[in-house]
Amino acid sequence: MPEGHSVRRLARQFGDVFAGRRLAVSSPQGRFSGGAALLDGHTLLTAEAHGKHLFLHFDNSLVLHVHLGLYGAWSFGGDRTFTGASSIGAPRRVGEQEAFADGDDDADAAYAGPPAPVGAVRVRLASSHGWADLRGATTCETITAAEAEAVLARLGPDPLRNRRGDAGRFAANLQRRKTPLAALLMDQKIIAGIGNVYRAEVLFRLRLHPWLPGSAVPDTAARKLWRDVVALMNDGVADGRIITTPPKYWTLDGTTAAKAAAAGLPVPARSSSFPSREDAHFVYKRHGLPCRVCRTVVLMADLAGRNLYWCPTCQQE
């Protein structure tokens, strides 16, 4: 399931390519025909993300509310004004499904409109410059602004908003529950936007045991956890992927950056190089492999229907 940083990138893309434009809204699949008709011909004003929820606000005071869930995905295409608008969702590929008009110097003139829908397209948004197709979402509904506010009211604080008082609200949300910390971090009423990857990684980075009850987390530790999530998710928005390890753990030309530095070789900064998928995380999907810090074997267990990864030495009770 796309985590909060991906949905924030989606909102930014919609703002970049559609804000201020009158849109043709349709449901090629037919399942969303009624909701699409309410938005068709209206102008998109703003795109907003909160956690894993996307809200597209139109000039008739209606909102397209989308939650991608496990199988939802948006794909984009159009003329050169859509450069950088990449598909986001399942499968989790960024920048691999972009579609642009053919042509060299006059790409806008070459754009002849969106292609025929492929697959079960729940909703299509189209302007004179491009289109966006949604497939497989858990939630796709046209709601009022008041209903959108009601959805927001049910969600916990979003680290990518990080408003005044959010750290304290998050700490209080944890401390009044005896549920294991690893389960609470996946509860969108506690904190909005964290998924399985961020959950495993932030617990490791702060050396917190996954089964520690929320009520046992000191206020200082809860606020430190909040700050780390804020930093990691903002990096995710900038990078377009989740990277939780510093460069010293990345493999460069067959050797780790830490060994390269020890040998006096240059080590690239985070901003100039990205790690391989295998080097990007401390524990996520590394069960059976040695911990990057202590070399203990990383474990995996089922918690609330999702795989949890942790190091039993670094994350002792």
Image (cartoon, rainbow, N blue to C red):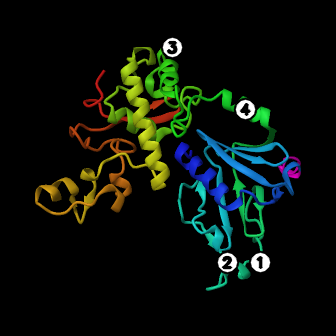
The C terminus: image quadrant: top left
First-in-chain label (2 vs 1): 2
Mark on residue 112? 1
Looking at the image, residue 80 sits to the left or right of residue 214; the answer is: right
Residue closer to the observer: 238 or 122: 238
For badge 2, the amino acid type reads Ala
Q: Which mark is residue 45?
A: none
> Distance from label 1 to label 3 (Cα)?
57 Å
In primary-sequence order, the first of circles 3 and 2 is 2
**Residue 185 to residue 33: above or below:** above
User: Distance of mark 2 from mark 1, alpha carbons?
Assistant: 8 Å
Q: Is residue 274 visible?
A: no
Question: Tag 1, which secondary structure?
Answer: loop
**Is residue 242 shown left or right of residue 282?**
right
Comes first in the chain, label 1 or label 3: 1
Residue behind mark 3: 176
Secondary structure beneath label 4: helix
Q: Position of residue 94 (x, y in %)?
A: 53, 60
- Which numbered disc, 3 or 4, marks the residue that appears first in the sequence? 4
Residue at (68%, 73%) from the top-left corner? 79
- Secondary structure, mark 3, is loop
Q: Is residue 36 magenta?
A: yes
Q: Residue 166: percent from the left, percent from the top?
A: 52, 28
Comparing 153 with 199, the one in front is 153
Q: Amino acid at mark 1?
A: Ala
Q: What residue is pinned by disc 2?
A: 101
Tell me, for residue 149, which label it has, or none: 4
Write down the region rendered in magenta. Answer: 31-37
Horizontally, residue 216 falls left or right of residue 150, namely left
**Residue positioned 32% across, 53% down in the render:** 279
Question: In whole angstroms, how far apart are the C-alphas of marks 3 and 4?
Answer: 25 Å
- Residue 91, percent from left and from top: 57, 55
